[in-house]
Image (spheres, rainbow, N blue to C red):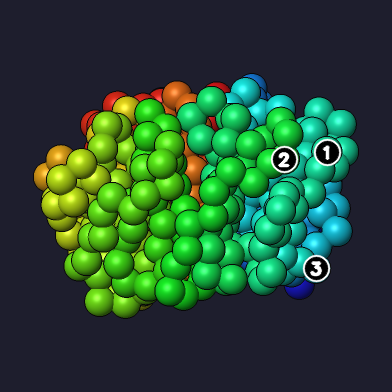
Amino acid sequence: GPPAVPPGLPAPPLPPAPPPLSPAGVRVFRGHTDSVVSVVFGEGDELASAGNFDGTVRFWSLESGEALRTLHTGAMVVLDIALSPGGARMASAGFDSAVKLWYVPTGTLEQRLLGSSPHTETVTAVAFGRNGTILASASYDRTVKMWHVESGKLLKTLKHAGGVKAVAFSADGRYLASADDAAVKVWDVRTGKRERLMRGHTFDVTALAFGAGSVLASASEDDTVRTWDVESGKELRVLKGHLGMVTAVAFSPDGSAIASGGYDRTVRLWDTDTGSHFHTLLGHSDDVLSLAFSADGALLASGSGDRTLRAERGACGAAGRGGGSDHWV
């Protein structure tokens, strides 16, 4: 131990305080007991996340980093969550083959979407349409189903050749994208007709996100993200840089930047127009599995196999891309 201080001499100065666990501009959220497979921004100060095998959805305060409440979904495994515009409703998907709708303010289960033909296998992904009246659910039963949220009525069943892993609505609500293999399928929401089949990836697509207008991004097990124009079906850019499969993708609210995350434990930021990589976020100690931007673009949240969420302020601003300040305030 340290040498004893002789009587009458002042004690040595205390060692400097250890640095904070996270750099300025980053908030780390801990509490899930398994991988954080889905993350979404709620209204105001809230962030919601789903833990894979812990079966819970947790709501966090962005300001304090504390868990505000925990919702037990009743499913052994949760694979995805989605919040309706306005944040009052949440849909959850998981191993129990059920699509569940929750009323967020009270945490109560409103309904299980069964309709005339419920899913028969694991539900992998859920997404709300533009105004929250329609919900899409993807499943290993080789279908995507579209539901009327208020009534719970099944509107359409879109059949696929394999288990569907990803689903996303365009911002204007006209298109629905889905993937059950290496190709991306685009459907007309009103008619249920498949409009596009877009090929380019060499392994399965894992995640989909729409940006501004008709631009769609797809993440894949082939270690790339690709962008597409769904109106023409044309591939726009191939984003290469990840050192493992890419499992999450998100657009900044203005569509100018794309965030991607994957098995190399990084979050990478790309310029949508040029496809150039401009920033890498480090900090997770396991696979990055989920990503979301806040509505104002100032925050980027990532969920990981390391059981944590990280919310980074000014991620796009780090390279002069616009967005929030560089420090948490």
Q: Is residue 13 visible?
A: no
In front here: 258 or 197? 197
Q: Residue at x 23, y 60 (%)?
A: 198
Q: Amino acid at mark 2?
A: Gly
Residue at 20 percent of width and 67 percent of height: 200
| Mark 1 / mark 3, whichever is N-terminal | 3
* Residue count near mark 2 (Cα–Cα under 10 Å), binned few <14, some 14–19, many ≥20: some
Instruction: Indicate which label's residue lies in the foreground, 1 or 3.
Output: 1
Residue at x 78% of width, y 39% of height: 102
- Expressed as whole percent of the image width and height from the top left, the position of residue 71 reads 83, 47
Say what secondary structure mark 3 lies in.
loop
How far apart in space, not on screen, are marks 1 and 3 (Cα)? 19 Å
Helix, strand or loop at label 2? It is loop
Residue under numbered circle 3: 76
Q: Are marks 1 and 3 in contact (CB under 8 Å)?
A: no
Residue position for label 1: 110
Task: Name the spot of residue 72 as percent of width and height, x first.
Answer: 85, 53
